[in-house]
Amino acid sequence: MTGKSLPLLLALAAMALPGAAGAQDNPDALIDASRQVDSGLALANRQIAGNDLLGALGTLERVQFAHPEAVPPRLVYISLLCRLDDREGAEVELSLLGGKPIADSDWAGVAAACGPVTRPAPPRKGHR
Amino acid sequence: MKRWPFHPAGRAAAALACTSLVASPLLAQANSVGIEAAIRNKVEIRAAATKKVKPAVLHDRVFLGDQAQTDKASQLQILLLDLSTFTVGASARVTIDRFVYDPATNRRDVGISVARGAFRFMSGRSVGKPTGPVSVRTPVATIGIRGTIFEGVVGEEAEKIAEREPAVGKVKSDSDEASLIVLRGPGPRTQGDTTPGAIDVSAGDRTATLNEADLAAYVPRRGAAPIVFRLSPAGLLALQSLLRTVPEEGGGGNGGHGGRDALIGAAGIAASILLGGKNKGSVQSQGQKQPVKPPPPPRSPNGRP
């Protein structure tokens, strides 16, 4: 285990502990969990499940600062904008994805939250 | 560099903030008001206590009066102790000059000054969220917040974005101080336990209430009244170019400078897929409410492929 991963593991462990009420209120734990895509998405999903939609938006913004290339956090971000009734903002965010491949399972979340919305075209063969 | 007078109530509030924060169980270090939660490219903090400037570091505490300064294509997210987030966009200079938060009562009183550049504020937890006034000051406007997400930009970029909007057009603007403020939500049909957001933008002798996502207020110069309109997709993208990253930038948090071009290039795409919206808002002047009729947003058919 590296020294770098220890704080993240401790933060995740703290949030996963039964009865760790308020662990999601610990700013340092929130920051550590947002440093990686998977843990950031897991945190955002917990926040969404707890109806903390704005907290989830903040988490995903942190994830995107560190991993701007990652598509799944952007899709969850877009679905959150729809749930927060910022449809125009969601469409603008969607346009930024360009030709990035989108997994059907990820897109399902956007469609469920946003309703009818144009899915960005997949990249053509021979193009990145 | 222009200097602002410290708000008359600021010193008393600052003292209160210190008292409140020292007593806070959330606080590891007295006087801190937030944490440097995400950093992109070049961000520096000018410490209020020492006047020294140092690079922002993840997890470092932000103290009352510290000034965050970002370079081009750079951003900083500050996680405030009430779990609100304040994002400092590109080429910005921001100071948190008032912060009182009592976790026991969940009451807060927050004041933030933006001298230049882009910013975004998102209220804390939607469940059990803190209550109390939050205000953001720009050189020409004061924004009062009621549980919400909003963005803004001060200076030349505000002027550029606003003057491309048909509802604004060419107006006499101060390129150092012009301020553009946009409500991003939550909208009236928001889900979960969130409540619709609203902000009051006060400038000159008027207050404009923005109560729907993507309604904007532009204050071109000191003393001017806010011009209320619905921000176009192109305008929204231009603002996002100062606040957001794009997938093409690559990973690792070091980013590049191609993001802005990608964002601007996407404006046309966004405009072509946007659904229609509705326009509501009001401007209050000396106790009288005036209806505002922003121009209709672009419409186009939209559906699944």
Image (cartoon, rainbow, N blue to C red):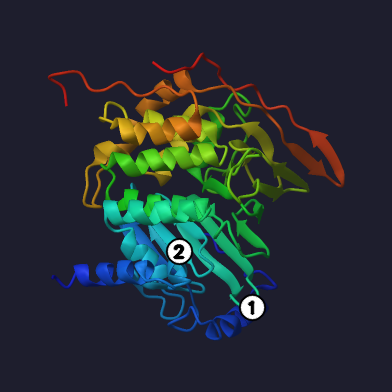
User: What's the residue at 34%, 24% (across, down)?
Assistant: A120
Most extreme residue toward the front, as rendered?
A: A18
Amino acid type, callout 2:
Leu
Quarter residue B139 falls in? bottom right
Q: Which residue is mark 2?
A: B79
What is the number of the mark on residue B11? 1
Is residue B261 visible in the rendered image? The answer is no
Choose between B66 and A122: the one closer to the eye. A122
User: Tag 1: residue type?
Assistant: Arg
| Element marked by disc 1 | helix
Q: Is residue A2 visible?
A: yes
Camera-nearest residue between B191 and B32: B191
**The residue tagged with tag 2: helix, strand or loop?**
strand
Question: Is residue B216 positioned above or below B128 on the image?
Answer: above
Asked whether B81 or B96 is in front, the reply is B81
Which chain letter matches label 1? B
**Image spot of residue A1 (x, y percent):** 13, 70
Q: Is residue B262 found left or right of B284 in the rendered image?
A: left
Could you tell me which quadrant the C terminus of chain B lies in? top left
In the rendered view, tell whether residue B143 sits above or below residue B32.
above
Residue A98 at x, y percent in the picture: 31, 27
At horizontal 53% and vertical 40% (from top left) the residue drawn is: A83
Considering only order in the chain, which callout, 1 or 2, is on the residue closer to the N terminus?
1
Using the rendered view, name the quadrant where residue A2 is placed: bottom left
Q: Position of residue A108 (x, y in %)?
A: 39, 32
How far apart in space, not on screen, are marks 2 and 1 (Cα)? 23 Å
